[in-house]
Image (spheres, rainbow, N blue to C red):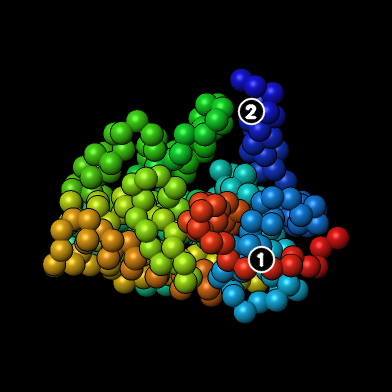
Amino acid sequence: MNPRDQVSDALYGLGWSTVKRLPEPVAVRLGRTIADLAWKQRGKGVLRLESNYARVAPDAGPERLAELSRAGMRSYLRYWMESFRLPSFSAEHIRDGFAVKDLHHLTDGLAAGRGVVLALPHLANWDLAGAWVTTELKIPFTTVAERLKPETLYDRFVAYREGLGMEVLPHSGGTAFGTLARRLRDGGLVCLVADRDLSASGVEVDFFGDTARMPAGPALLAQQTGALLLPVTLWYDDSPVMRGRIHPPIEVPEAGNRAEKTSVMTQALANAFATGIADHPEDWHMLQRLWLADLDPARPAPPSRPSGGAA
């Protein structure tokens, strides 16, 4: 393990071992302090977050974008502080920490014996929502995790999510899709974060007026297993409670081949994500490049915006 990986693994380990012991007000203040310091440093992640917000809010000027990126970093650190403390939450704390609209889309689908795919963007804290599903609804589900480096860090994340009642499959290795399909054919639940795919197999979608690539998996799973495909969006408000909405099902089109159906369904998923992100852009934790124009230097980039507002 190289020194950088050792430091990364140690920091995450410190978070799960130490932050979870902090009283909630202390953890909240700590997260906000770290977020504000990172925002003032204007590092690559903060600048990328601000650039992504410029696409979500194209009419925002420099001051508004700076406000959004500061709020975005605070939301991002809230996610981490919650995640480090989540294994120590009581069932009551988890139950009272999340409220969701239109839950019937999920419960009706499962009651009918159909598998359900919940697809989410990087909004707010999907781990908390997942813990609520396994704790409050008593519904286990299967998800996929990217293989992180070092391997010990990946193992930490797997152990963390398995401790919340999730079955976690590695993204790489080629077996995840088949296992997910089996879970769905058995009437189970699959949850996937699905707003970013940089692989060659990703589906191109129109996202806030330009082309991005999102994973084909949710749409393909729905087609091959007959499962419901339900977009989910999450957000924080001014209270300690995180909120969410389960959107209506994305139906499999009657016409077209598999690729055409997948394209239509993934675009519908992107549209639902865009609705939630536009309503709560500060809770979208996208600190990486997403749009193809930002990834491919041969494509024209959007007009640059002065950042403003940071020391």
Q: Is residue 292 visible?
A: yes
Q: Position of residue 227 (x, y in %)?
A: 22, 57
At a point 63% along the width and 62% down the height, the residue shown is 51
Give, as a three-letter code, the residue at label 2.
Asp
**Disc 2 element:** helix
Q: Amino acid at mark 1?
A: Ser
Residue contact at pointers 2 and 1, CB within 8 angstroms:
no
* Residue at 13 percent of width and 67 percent of height: 255
Residue sitting nearer the eye, 213 or 117: 213
Q: Residue at x 53, y 75 (%)?
A: 279
Q: CA distance from mark 2 to mark 1?
A: 33 Å
Q: Is residue 129 left or right of residue 289?
A: left
User: Around disc 1, counting alpha carbons within 10 Å, would you say few (fewer than 14), some (14 to 19), or many (20 or more)?
Assistant: few
- Marks 2, 1: nearer the viewer: 1
> Which of 267/9 is in front?
267
Q: Can you tell which quarter of the image residue 272 is in?
A: bottom left
Please name whichever residue, 65 or 76, is drawn nearer the observer in this view of the structure: 65
**In-front residue for pair 219/86:** 219
In the drawing, what numbered circle is on residue 304?
A: 1
Specify which label sits upstream in the sequence, 2 or 1.
2
Residue sitting farthest toward the front: 298
Secondary structure type for disc 1 = loop
Rendered location of residue 213, percent (x, y): 41, 56
Quadrant of the image occupied by residue 171: top left
